[in-house]
Amino acid sequence: QRLNNNFQFVEVGRQDPKKKAISTRKKQFVEIYEPFRQAQVNDQAHRCLACGNPYCEWKCPVHNYIPNWLKLASEGNILEAVELSHQTNTLPEVCGRVCPQDRLCEGSCTLNDGFGAVTIGNVEKYITDTAFAMGWKPDMSNVVPTGKRVAIIGAGPAGLGAADILVRNGVTPVVFDKYPEIGGLLTFGIPEFKLEKTVMSNRRKVFEEMGVEFRLETEVGKDVDFQSIIDEFDAVFLGMGTYNYMKGGFPGEDLPGVYDALDFLISNVNRNLGFEKDAADFISMKGKQVVVLGGGDTAMDCNRTSIRQGATRVSCAYRRDEANMPGSKREVTNAREEGVKFLFNRQPIAIVGEDKVEGVKVVTTEMGEPDENGRRRPQVVEGSEEILPADAVLVAFGFRPSPAPWFKDFGIELNSWDGVIAPETQEFKHQTTNPKIFAGGDMVRGSDLVVTAIFEGRQAAEGILDYLDV
Ligand code: FAD
Ligand code: SF4
């Protein structure tokens, strides 16, 4: 017997979608979650309390109208739900898959108070996937062309967020990217078991039908110079990401068998998507004892890709404890289920080996006082050195900004850590020190999240519309 519907959250617990069998997950590069069915969406979305002033909306970086589209979805009103979710988000089907919801919308759900948060991310994904399957497309019939054209450098989430707002306001975006597919790290970074690549190729078709032009395999500064872009377009948006690898600064990092995380992940995507130009570029962990260094999302992706490639053992060494890991808790759980061994409180001090890597020398740490960001600092335990045997080491310490050498020729100034200066607080949001050029995403805020890059791209596009006075 069902209780009054308003108390659905008491009767029906939180349910995540089912995961595929571990034996399949360990081998295949496909998403691990089964899609929700409408009946599950009805049950799960209806658990929402429709709080008057919902924390989830405030915590969601794009400020999605979450309770409103949860209600529409629970009633099976998918076409209205998808329109509403696109009012605030450019890629809801992507965010539903890859946002660390436990730290964002779901982490602030009132039902965490003993009942389990509403499965917001999975409903968001369901709405867009289902709408696309029903043939839904963004309605562009009321858009009035302005005749203005804006160049966007980078087809990652920041660039796509900007393109979405511009094209819906009658400005033609022309998006340049050096890669052969759109998505930035969504395609050439995040692996298929979190985000299948057809999601982005479908989105490209949708964007093209909306009027966005893509010039792929075109590197600005190499295949086309920036001056010609500045001359041709009314404004420019830069969404070029951060691609300088952080190094550990310890001996042995250049030994054969030590790889940067993203080189490894991209080589795997290139092989799976048929973009590989030279078979020698493929980095394989098959039959190897792998040690992954780091504790963020990139490290988790390296762990789980190594498992799928057939590594004999995958260990992940991280210098803090589990509670202080920066990566999504969900991905740590998934990695553990797939057989990754976590070694917490282990700080690498050297990579050892004669002609190639043979192991990683680590020391044990204890958690000390919090640093300026509130995270507890690891402190080395005297005499705790040990060697972790390894045939391959994947270094996933994160990224620093990678400003292009031509920025200074165009008056694009950088801050003390090489991020492009383009604050939201400008008269024209996210304008750089060159008035015609705007910027957003990782290259402005440092390595962050898909959803924050989308938000900044959208905000910068608002700034561009104001600057163009359209
Ligand atoms: P990017 O996605 O890096 O896109 C920049 C684009 O600019 C690229 O396509 C690049 O080719 C292009 N470009 C650069 N220079 C030029 C040039 N000169 N000419 C032409 N094109 C150029 N975030 C999450 O929210 N959830 C996750 O699960 C998650 N997992 C991640 C896993 C990995 C392995 C990594 C590395 C990051 C992950 N992130 C995750 C972070 C997230 O992917 C980034 O924060 C986000 O993609 C940044 O978007 P962006 O548009 O600023 O840059
Ligand atoms: Fe949650 Fe991310 Fe969707 Fe916002 S965009 S509702 S944070 S999953």
Image: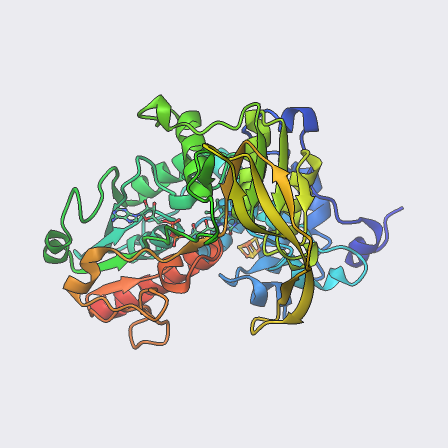
Q: Which quarter of the figure is the C terminus placed in? A: bottom left
Find residue 53 and report its image quarter: bottom right
- The location of residue 103, given as percent across then percent down, is 62, 59
Front position in the image: 364 or 173: 364
Q: Residue at x 37, y 52 (%)?
A: 244
Residue 92 visible (yes or no): yes
- The location of residue 351, given as percent across then percent down, is 52, 43
Find residue 197 and report its image quarter: top left
Front position in the image: 342 or 83: 342
Q: Measured along the vertical axis of the image, is residue 300 above or below residue 86?
A: above
Q: Residue at x 63, y 40 (%)?
A: 388
Q: Measured along the vertical axis of the image, is residue 62 above or below residue 98?
A: below
Colour mode of the rendering: rainbow
Front position in the image: 75 or 269: 269
Q: Is residue 242 left or right of residue 370?
A: left
Q: Is residue 235 left or right of residue 43?
A: left
- The location of residue 6, given as percent across then percent down, is 78, 59
Residue 98 visible (yes or no): no
For ligand 2, give the image quadrant.
bottom right
Q: Residue at x 64, y 52 (%)?
A: 363
Q: Measured along the vertical axis of the image, is residue 293 above or below residue 115?
A: above
Q: Is residue 406 left or right of residue 422?
A: left
Q: Is residue 75 left or right of residue 140?
A: right
Front position in the image: 384 or 186: 384
Q: Measured along the vertical axis of the image, is residue 310 above or below residue 72?
A: above
Q: Residue furthest right?
A: 1
- The location of residue 308, given as percent across then percent down, is 57, 28
Total labels: the figure holds 0
